[in-house]
Image (spheres, rainbow, N blue to C red):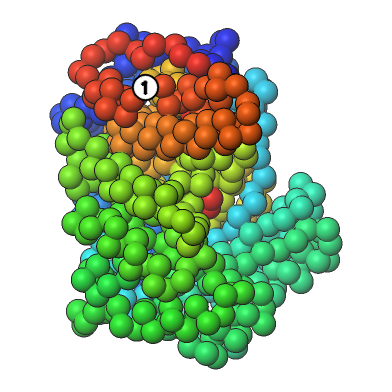
Amino acid sequence: MRRAVTSGTPLPAPDDPDPTQPPDPTPTTPSDAAPPADAAPPAAPGLDPHAGPPAGPHPDPPPGPGPHAGPPADAHRDPHPGPHVDAAVAQQLRHARHAPWPYTRLDVAAARAAGHRPHPIRQFVLKTRSRCNLACTYCYVYEMADQGWRDQPPAMTPATIARAAQRIAEHAAAHDLPRIDLVLHGGEPLLSAPAQLAAPVEAVRTAVAGAAPSTRVTATVQTNGTLLTRGRLTALAAAGIRVGVSLDGGLPAHNTRRVDHAGRPGFASAARGLRLLARHPQSYAGVLCVVDLDQDPIETYESLLAFDPPSVGLLLPLANWSAPPPGHRTGRTPYADWLLAVFERWWHDGVRRTRIQLFEEIIALLLGLPTTTETLGLTPAATAVIETDGSIEQADSLKSAYEGAAATGMTLDTHSFDQLLDHPGLAARQLGRDALAGWCRACELVDVCGGGHYPHRYRAGEGFRRPSVYCADLQRLIRHIAAAVQRAAQTTRTAAGAPAAEAADSPVAEAAETPAAEATEAAEAPTAEAPADHPPAVAS
């Protein structure tokens, strides 16, 4: 089994905190900001603690991250800078204040010189609409820390679409990419007329065909489902655009927070759209659902199956150390409990009725297989977001942290996607272990967990170098699934006549060695000691 801590990787410093303990609530200010929770020395040249700052309405997400419960909209909002302050400088200062890691502690040029190579962008999220026909009360675009949507044009213009297509084709050609993925996103992208829905995808495909003819272009639209009609589905199918729908569960009671601007429930319209979509399986990408502790997990899962989804994405609410998720308590793993109830039903079902992305990704990572997820594992981030005004941003999920957290200061007119690769925010998400807290680097599950989803690591005044706020939940979930896979492997090997010892001597077996209860206790013990050095799709 591969050991979690490799030669040259620093272990946590003695004061590396227990990741499941809430941080010191004392607020930090620009003048007395605390060092990152990870007090270990830099993992590689280029992680310079003295480096300066970088130069330079429907919120349903693409497969992977999604709309999540979180802090109120003004929880981390900065006052607008005065007119004498340049907007780009103000953004740099905001990043430095809220997230010293990576914005003042990562020297990207030095990291590149030390051998860290950038990974090209492979998924492009096109914000074709910045407004939504729903007003979900927990929306991360409209109701959380970042309110940048207010300054965005309602729709992406043909000129912006053409410029985006040119930049994407340029990037695909420069890196000889075999495939790129487009996600039409919002706001609610289906606010566009049926005849206009496919225009961004057709523009990109035409540009890519001219600049990088060997690059294949796939496309998905992520919607709340309320505007799905036969005409829209016909237009999307003709353009080869698959449809993903965000829903909180398959019953009206699960969706009380998904309402329109008059406060009327949106479930009936969404359910009608999903039933229509289910008749077009070639266009059906799947359903995304955020875990809600107030809802019964089995009822939620079974109710979603009524819409015949080929895939279900179960997402942890967007939360962090400064705005913990509902039900977050030391010594408890409520999100693992919820997810494992669904896992047991799914795993032991006689017929595989759908794919569940989270479980399949954990299993793949346990087996050492490659995945494309940024929510688990150490796969480098490879997603760029293009807003309706042509600005280039990082993944939408960062909007849950603080105002401007996804901003880069780059636009399609002034920057290429290659320049985005050197932005500290994206570069930090491509460093693998070197970007993680010391506790994470020393953990035996790091290959699977990967430190957890990047926004879940945030703490105001420190940034993104803590373990996930869901650390204990992830440990329990991964170990339980590892034990289930190990038992299945032992049964298969025994039936085939293989020695039982072979089944036990595997990465999955080692990940499952610590019982779930013991793993949780170990993770939550209030100790300053690092864990022992033992040998664990979607895009954001």
Residue at label 1? 514
Q: Residues within 10 Å of mark 1 (few under 14, many from 20)?
A: some
Using the image as rendered, state which of residue 119 and residue 151 is in the foreground.
119
Relative to 4, say whether 368 is above or below.
Answer: below
Q: Most extreme residue toward the bottom, as rendered?
A: 231
Relative to 154, say whether 458 is above or below.
Answer: above
Task: State left or right for residue 157 relative to residue 268.
Answer: right
Residue 394 visible in the shown view = no
Q: How many marks?
A: 1
Q: Residue at x 43, y 81 (%)?
A: 275
Task: State left or right for residue 252 relative to residue 306.
Answer: left
Q: Position of residue 13 (x, y in %)?
A: 36, 11
Q: Position of residue 56 (x, y in %)?
A: 54, 42
Quarter of the image containing the N terminus?
top right
Q: Position of residue 148 (x, y in %)?
A: 37, 60
Report helix, strand or loop for mark 1: loop
Relative to 224, say whether 468 is above or below.
Answer: above
Q: Position of residue 101 (x, y in %)?
A: 41, 30
Relative to 519, say whether 400 is above or below.
Answer: below
Q: Residue at x 55, y 61 (%)?
A: 125
Q: Residue at x 49, y 59 (%)?
A: 351
Residue 419 visible in the shown view = yes
Quarter of the image where one finds residue 291: bottom left
Question: Identity of the amino acid at label 1?
Answer: Thr
